[in-house]
Image: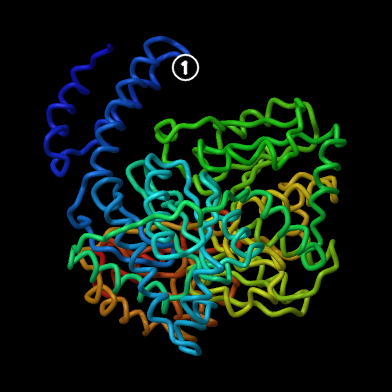
Amino acid sequence: MPHSPVVDALYRQHIHPENHADSDYFAVIAALVAERNRCAADSEEAAQWQRRIERVYELVADEMRHNSGKPRTPVKFGTSGWRGIIGKDIFVNSVTQVTRAIVAMYEELEPGSELAEALGVGSLAEAKTRGCVMGHDNRFGGELLARAACDVLTSHGFTVRYAGEATTGTLSAALLVHRAAFSINLTPSHNPLPYAGFKFNAADGGPAASTVTDRITTLARQLINANHSLALAPDAGLVRDLDALAAWLELVRRGEAQHGLDYQEIMTGFAKAENLVVAVDCVHGASRVHVHRLFQDLASPRLLFFRDQADPTFGGIAPEPSTANMRTVTAALRGRPEPLKLGVIMDPDADRIRFTDGTTEIDMNCFGAMAYHFLHEVKGKRGLVAKTVATSNFANQLARAFDEEVFEPRVGFKEFKPVIDRALICFEESDGITAIGHTPEKDAYIGLLLALAMVLALQKNLGDYREELRAAYGAFYPARDGVAVSQQGAELAATLAELEKYDVGATVRVGDEERRIARVIAIDGRKMLLDDGSWLMIRPSGTEPKVRFYVEARSEAGKDALFAAAKAMLADIGLLA
């Protein structure tokens, strides 16, 4: 068995087999993965490091099964569910208690109440009959946690449609197609290696409203604090196997009249398109269980798959769509002879996606606007566009040209609920998107289908399409950054309130120019739109002592000046030196 003085020291420092609570298994796993990655991929030495990784994961599994304490961080359901460290916050007992809290929520339902309306279910009996859609991503212990949640539900008479490893978008689609009452998805989305997560979607298929998540949080904390033993009697007869991808395909077929995406036509078109190569990077996430079938098991040298093997360590990378993680796909496409190239990368639960044509990277700030243009102008659909307030105004410019509305809520996909049946495209800058007639949950697969439809219909690469739109409607250059500050929470919010002096009509120094604030949007931090169409937004982090900046310039060079202007504002109110 290979040894490393550094790793051996980490073992001694972080692993205490008789005391899980004081053991930091993931610090050791990260070091072992780094050692494995230094070896030739198929070498015996790499295999030996992998065996060491698996032995540490055995300790993680033991902690997950036997931890009977409270989560280190109190349970809280936010915009994307509950997230925490595997074994320390999220383990069999805590998942069991949180699932029991969900049962308790349905037990207290009153017909016609605000909670019943938010859940889309009128009674406990209805919820039991319609049941739950259940799945998990590729995180270590996902099946163990999903089965624990399943046992709680069937013990209380709920039907469960169990998909096993699946993506967020396919589980949401299955919820809608099978008319289930709710879904539970064990995933922390794009969070780092040590994290697990628990997503709850109500009957509408989208992220649950605050009314729901606040109630789950309250009930879960009560159960965890009481720490009563839960008597369970699981009923295997209430569990049904679920093909989540089949449900997704059915939902796309049902929504075709609204979004204009003919799945079969698109896939047949790609199979015949000798001038197009497609590269898909799953980053070892749950999309790997679907992508081959999504492309109808096409065996073609023009269809490339990367990181589609099982690996809960994600090969040692931060598992998110990013420029750094896109390099494998970009390099592969650059070496291809086909004139049309499409590359995508998805996060572990495939609710986020980013694009490239081998030359130009397209993030959701731009792709969302392009998708809106495609549906509105190429497919001939009519309707508004929805985008979160921190997202590029490129789509706003298009909507003005089309004489259509823009719906611009605070950050969080659940904020699109008021227009989900009217907006052609809903998207957010953090690489999430959906289309009209589809699930109200963000879904990488619908993004992939949109991109493939664009390239096939227009016979253009995404980068060329973007440049055509820029020439016609103007160029927008979004970016984001942030700074650490000494304040947090209510104190930070109170200090940031002093930014109200930067109101409509006030001037801001941006580079060598004075710009007038033409409009202010204060629904999620403070977004100040300037008289040249550029803007800057300042909002506090909800989880750490940081202030986040979102900016959009009208030239590539203008972004730095906007960041400097944002920092000058913080200095002006005393947050920065």
Report the residue at 56% width, 38% height from top. 282
Report x, y in % for residue 215.
Answer: 35, 76
Report x, y in % for residue 201.
Answer: 50, 66
Q: What element carries label 1?
A: loop
Local crowd size for mark 1, using a 10 Å CA cut-off: few (<14), some (14–19), many (≥20): few
Which quarter shows the C terminus? bottom left
Occupied quadrant, residue 221: bottom left
Q: Can residue 321 be seen?
A: no
Query: Vertical placement of 352 versus 297: above or below?
Result: below
Occupied quadrant, residue 526: bottom left
Q: Name the residue under label 1.
A: 41
Q: At label 1, which amino acid type do we have? A: Ala
Q: Can residue 85 be seen?
A: yes
Q: Is 336 displayed left or right of 74 in the figure?
A: right
Colour mode of the rendering: rainbow
Report the residue at 73% width, 58% height from top. 252
Report the residue at 80% width, 74% height from top. 382
Which quarter shows the N terminus? top left
Report x, y in % for residue 68.
Answer: 19, 52
Q: Nearer the viewer, residue 163 or 544?
A: 163
Residue that lies at the very extreme toward the bottom in this rendered image:
112
Q: How many labels does the image show?
A: 1
Q: Which of 145 and 238 is in front in this view?
A: 238
Report x, y in % for residue 411.
Answer: 48, 69
Query: Vertical placement of 228 versus 306: above or below?
Result: below
Q: Is 384 displayed left or right of 89 in the figure?
A: right
Q: Which of 130 and 539 is in front in this view?
A: 130
Occupied quadrant, residue 37: top left
Query: Vertical placement of 373 versus 505: above or below?
Result: above
Report the residue at 44% width, 82% height from top. 115
